[in-house]
Image (cartoon, coloured by chain):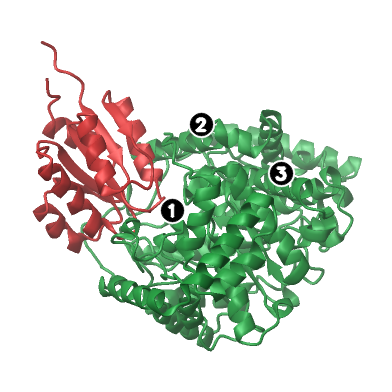
Chain colours: A red, B green
C-alpha cells in the first residue's frame, strides 16, 4: 500500500495578524508535495486543535509573532493530548526568543523555527520526522 | 525633459561610445552579479541618460514645490519651514506604562505621539475576553475604557501635541475616547489634532486586523470622515496605509498602487453616502508608507505617490482646493527588512530607510528600533532610533534644499516607471469594479502572496541578500537585552475592568449601546453616540459587539 501524502496544518493561534510567514510556509509545503490545510488568522487554541483532529493531520505548524506563544503554543499541545491526539506533531515559529525554547520544548513543541530559517530546512525537518500515516 | 537638439545629439553620441566601452570592459572584467535589480525585483539599467527623460516635461511632470503635480512636495519651503515630525510608534503594557514612555520620548525631543495598542484592543476585544488570552499588553497598550484612556494621556497637552492612533476596526471607539478625554480636560474638539489609522481595506488586503465585512467597515470610516469635517477639523480621520501591504510582502509598486486605489475607494464611498463635496473632506485624508531598504526605489515611490494622488483628485474627482490635491504622509522604516541575526546592523538599515523617507519628502517619520524584530523596543534602542532622525535633520544637511534628487536621469526615470506600473494596477482594479470587489476575489491578497513567496525563494537561493542571514552569517552572538511584558499586566487590567463594571451605571451603558445600534441600522453617524457611550463607561468590546451584531463578522479566508 503506498504511503499517503504527509498532511500538515498551518495555523495562527491568537489575535496576531502577521501571516506572511505562515502563508509562505503553507505554499512551500504544498510545493513540497504535502497536503496543506491553512486555517487563516485569529484561531483559538480550541479551534486549532479541533481542526487538526478533524482534518487528521500529521503535523501542526503554529505561527505567532505577538509574544503570546508562551501561552498559546502549550495550550494547543495540551488540548491535543486531552483529545487523545498526541500523535500529531506540533512545531512552532515566529518571533520566539531563545530563552523561551526550553519552556516550549518541555510543553511538547517538537521544533521551533525563527526568522532566517530557510524554507528547505523546514521541509527537510518535516520529511525526516513525519511519515505519512496510513 | 527639454534638452536642446545639440545636447541630445551629444548625449546619444556619448552613450553609444560608452556602450562600446562597456562591451569591451565586460570581456575582461565581468559584472559581479548576473542581475542588478531593486529589492522589489525591478530591473535597473547600468546607466540613465537624458534619453530616458525624452518624454518628461519639466513644467507638467516635475514642476515646483507646492504646485501641481506636487512631485517636489506639498510645502513651498520644504523642510526649511519645519522638519518632518519625529513620531515614534509606542505602546506597551498598561496605560501608565505607555504614558511613562511617551513622556520620556517628549523629553528627548520627539515632536508627535503615536500609539501602539495590544491585539485585543486592535481587534475590539476587552482584556477579559477569552480571545485575549496571552495577548494583553504584549504588542502595545491595553485600553478597555475611557478610564484607561485618561491614564494614557495623563499630563499630555492635547491642544499642543498631535497624537496618532494605529487603530482600525474599533477606530470610532478609540477616537470617541480621545474626543471625550479632550472634553473632560476642557480642550475643545476643534483644537485637538491627530490621526486615526482607520483604514480597513488594507486590513483585508494585508494586516488582517478585521471585525466586520468590507462594506460596513467602509461605512464606519465614512462616518468618521464626516464627523471630522464638521467638528474636529484638525484631525486626520484616516491614514490610508501602504505600510502593512509592504510588510506582508508586496513590491514597492504594489504598495503604491493598492494604497492609492484604497484611497479612491474611500473617496467614492464618502461621496456616495454623505452630503459632502470632495473639497469638504479631501484635505484631511492622510497616507502612510513604508520605507524599505532599496534607497532609490523608495524615494521614487514616495515622489510618484504625490503625483498620482494629485492627478486622481484633480482629474477623477474634480477637486478644486489645492489642499485636496496634497498627499500628506507619514513613513515608517521597514520592520520586515530588519534581522534578528546581528541585530545591531539594524541601526544602519533604519538610517538608510529614514534617509529614503526624507529624500522622498515625508511629513512625519517613525524609525524602528534595532530590537523591534525581537521584542518591544527598550528605552536605549528607541533613543538611538529617535536620535537617527535628529542626526538626519540637524547634522547631515539633507534638509537644506527641497527634493534634492529631482532632475536626476535615474530618479526621474524610475519615478515615471513606478507611476506607470501603479496606474496599470489601478486600472485593473477599476475594471474589477473597485477595491472591495477585488478583495472579494482575493486579487490583491494573491498578488502580494506571490511577491512574498518569490522574495523568500530568492533569499533562500542567495539571489537577494540579507546580511547576517544568508550571507556573512556568524556564530558569534552579541545579544541585545529583551524587553518582556509581565503577565501580571493582564491580570491587573482584568481586575480594573471588573471593578469598573461594578461601579458604572449599567442602565446608562445599555441605553448608549442601544443608540449606537439604532444609528448603525438607520444610517445616522455613529460618532456622537460612541462619544456618549464611552463617557457612560461602555467598554471597547461592548461597542464593537454592537457592530458585530448588526453587521456580522468577517473571517479570514486563509488565502495563500
Q: Are marks 3 and 2 on the same chain?
A: yes
Residues at discs 3 and 2 in contact (Cβ within 8 Å) = no
The span from disc 2 to disc 1 (Cα, nearest Å) is 39 Å
Q: Chain of mark 2?
A: B
Task: Answer with left or right where residue B97 lies relative to residue B409.
Answer: left
Residues at discs 1 and 3 in contact (Cβ within 8 Å) = no
Seen from the viewer's position, the closer of residues B544 and B76 is B544
Q: Nearer the viewer, mark 2 or mark 1?
A: 1
Secondary structure of the residue carrying tag 3 is helix
Q: Chain of mark 3?
A: B
The residue carrying mark 3 is B413
Q: Residues within 10 Å of mark 3 (few under 14, many from 20)?
A: many
Relative to B297, say whether B198 is above or below. Answer: below
Q: Quadrant of residue A100?
A: bottom left
The span from disc 3 to disc 2 (Cα, nearest Å) is 29 Å
Seen from the viewer's position, the closer of residues B493 and A91 is B493
> What is the x, y in percent for residue A27?
36, 32
The span from disc 1 to disc 3 (Cα, nearest Å) is 27 Å
Query: Looking at the image, can residue B29 be seen?
Result: no
> What is the x, y in percent for residue B464?
42, 42
Q: Quadrant of residue B395?
A: bottom right
The residue carrying mark 1 is B336
Secondary structure of the residue carrying tag 2 is helix
Q: Nearer the viewer, mark 1 or mark 3?
A: 1
Seen from the viewer's position, the closer of residues B508 and B145 is B508
Q: Nearer the viewer, mark 3 or mark 2?
A: 3
On residue B27, the disc is: 2
Relative to A25, say whether B325 is above or below. Answer: below
Amino acid at each position: 500500500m503506498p504511503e499517503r501524502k504527509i498532511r500538515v496544518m498551518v495555523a495562527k493561534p491568537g489575535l496576531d495578524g502577521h501571516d506572511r510567514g505562515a502563508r509562505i510556509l503553507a505554499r512551500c509545503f504544498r510545493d513540497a508535495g504535502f497536503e496543506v490545510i491553512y486555517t487563516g488568522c485569529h484561531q483559538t487554541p480550541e479551534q486549532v486543535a479541533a481542526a487538526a483532529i478533524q482534518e487528521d493531520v500529521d503535523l501542526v505548524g503554529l505561527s505567532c509573532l505577538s509574544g503570546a506563544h508562551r501561552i498559546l503554543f502549550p495550550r494547543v499541545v495540551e488540548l491535543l493530548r486531552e483529545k487523545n491526539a498526541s500523535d500529531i506533531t506540533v512545531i512552532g515559529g515566529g518571533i520566539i526568543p531563545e530563552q523561551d525554547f526550553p519552556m516550549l520544548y518541555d510543553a511538547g513543541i517538537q521544533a521551533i523555527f525563527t526568522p532566517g530559517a530557510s524554507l528547505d530546512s523546514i521541509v527537510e525537518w518535516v520529511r525526516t520526522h513525519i511519515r505519512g500515516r496510513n | 525633459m527639454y534638452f536642446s537638439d545639440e545636447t541630445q545629439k551629444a548625449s546619444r553620441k556619448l552613450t553609444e561610445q560608452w556602450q562600446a566601452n562597456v562591451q569591451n570592459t565586460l570581456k575582461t572584467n565581468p559584472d559581479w552579479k548576473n542581475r542588478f535589480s531593486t529589492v522589489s525585483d525591478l530591473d535597473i539599467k547600468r546607466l540613465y541618460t537624458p534619453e530616458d527623460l525624452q518624454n518628461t516635461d519639466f513644467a507638467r511632470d516635475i514642476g515646483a514645490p507646492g504646485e501641481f503635480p506636487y512631485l517636489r512636495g506639498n510645502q513651498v519651503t520644504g523642510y526649511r519651514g519645519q522638519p518632518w515630525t519625529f513620531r515614534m510608534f509606542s505602546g506597551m503594557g498598561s496605560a501608565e506604562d505607555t504614558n511613562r514612555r511617551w513622556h520620556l520620548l517628549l523629553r528627548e525631543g520627539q515632536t508627535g505621539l503615536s500609539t501602539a495598542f495590544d491585539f485585543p484592543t486592535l481587534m475590539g476585544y476587552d482584556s477579559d475576553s477569552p480571545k485575549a488570552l496571552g495577548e494583553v499588553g504584549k504588542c502595545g497598550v491595553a485600553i478597555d475604557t475611557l478610564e484607561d484612556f485618561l491614564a494614557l494621556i495623563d499630563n499630555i497637552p492635547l491642544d499642543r501635541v498631535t497624537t496618532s492612533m494605529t487603530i482600525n476596526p474599533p477606530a470610532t471607539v478609540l477616537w470617541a475616547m480621545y474626543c471625550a478625554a479632550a472634553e473632560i480636560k476642557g480642550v475643545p474638539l476643534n483644537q485637538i489634532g491627530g490621526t486615526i489609522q482607520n483604514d480597513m481595506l488594507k486590513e483585508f488586503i494585508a494586516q488582517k486586523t478585521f471585525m466586520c465585512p468590507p462594506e460596513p467597515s467602509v461605512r464606519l470610516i465614512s462616518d468618521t470622515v464626516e464627523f471630522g469635517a464638521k467638528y474636529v477639523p484638525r484631525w486626520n480621520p484616516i491614514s490610508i496605509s501602504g505600510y502593512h501591504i509592504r510588510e506582508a510582502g508586496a513590491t514597492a509598486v504594489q504598495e503604491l498602487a493598492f494604497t492609492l486605489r484604497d484611497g479612491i475607494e474611500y473617496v467614492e464611498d464618502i461621496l456616495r453616502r454623505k452630503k459632502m463635496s470632495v473639497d469638504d473632506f479631501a484635505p484631511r485624508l492622510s497616507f502612510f508608507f513604508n520605507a524599505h531598504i532599496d534607497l532609490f526605489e523608495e524615494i521614487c515611490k514616495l515622489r510618484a505617490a504625490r503625483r498620482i494622488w494629485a492627478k486622481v483628485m484633480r482629474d477623477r474627482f474634480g477637486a478644486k482646493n489645492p489642499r485636496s490635491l496634497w498627499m500628506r504622509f507619514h513613513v515608517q522604516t521597514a520592520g520586515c527588512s530588519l534581522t534578528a541575526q546581528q541585530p545591531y546592523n539594524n541601526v544602519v538599515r533604519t538610517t538608510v530607510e529614514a534617509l529614503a523617507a526624507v529624500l522622498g519628502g515625508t511629513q512625519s517619520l517613525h524609525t524602528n528600533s534595532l530590537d523591534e524584530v525581537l521584542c518591544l523596543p527598550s528605552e536605549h534602542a528607541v533613543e538611538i532610533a529617535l536620535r537617527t532622525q535628529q542626526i538626519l535633520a540637524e547634522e547631515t544637511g539633507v534638509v537644506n534644499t527641497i527634493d534634492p534628487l529631482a532632475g536626476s536621469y535615474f530618479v526621474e526615470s524610475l519615478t515615471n516607471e513606478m507611476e506607470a506600473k501603479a496606474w496599470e494596477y489601478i486600472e485593473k482594479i477599476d475594471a474589477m469594479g473597485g477595491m472591495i470587489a477585488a478583495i472579494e476575489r482575493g486579487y490583491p491578497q494573491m498578488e502580494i502572496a506571490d511577491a512574498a513567496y518569490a522574495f523568500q525563494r530568492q533569499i533562500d537561493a542567495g539571489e537577494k541578500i540579507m546580511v547576517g542571514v544568508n550571507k556573512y552569517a556568524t556564530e558569534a552572538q552579541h545579544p541585545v537585552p529583551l524587553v518582556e511584558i509581565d503577565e501580571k499586566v493582564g491580570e491587573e487590567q482584568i481586575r480594573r475592568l471588573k471593578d469598573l463594571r461594578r461601579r458604572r451605571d449599567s442602565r446608562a451603558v445599555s441605553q448608549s449601546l442601544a443608540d449606537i445600534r439604532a444609528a448603525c441600522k438607520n444610517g445616522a453617524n455613529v460618532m456622537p453616540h460612541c462619544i456618549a457611550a464611552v463617557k457612560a463607561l461602555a467598554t471597547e468590546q461592548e461597542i464593537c459587539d454592537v457592530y458585530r451584531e448588526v453587521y456580522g463578522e468577517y473571517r479570514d479566508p486563509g488565502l495563500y
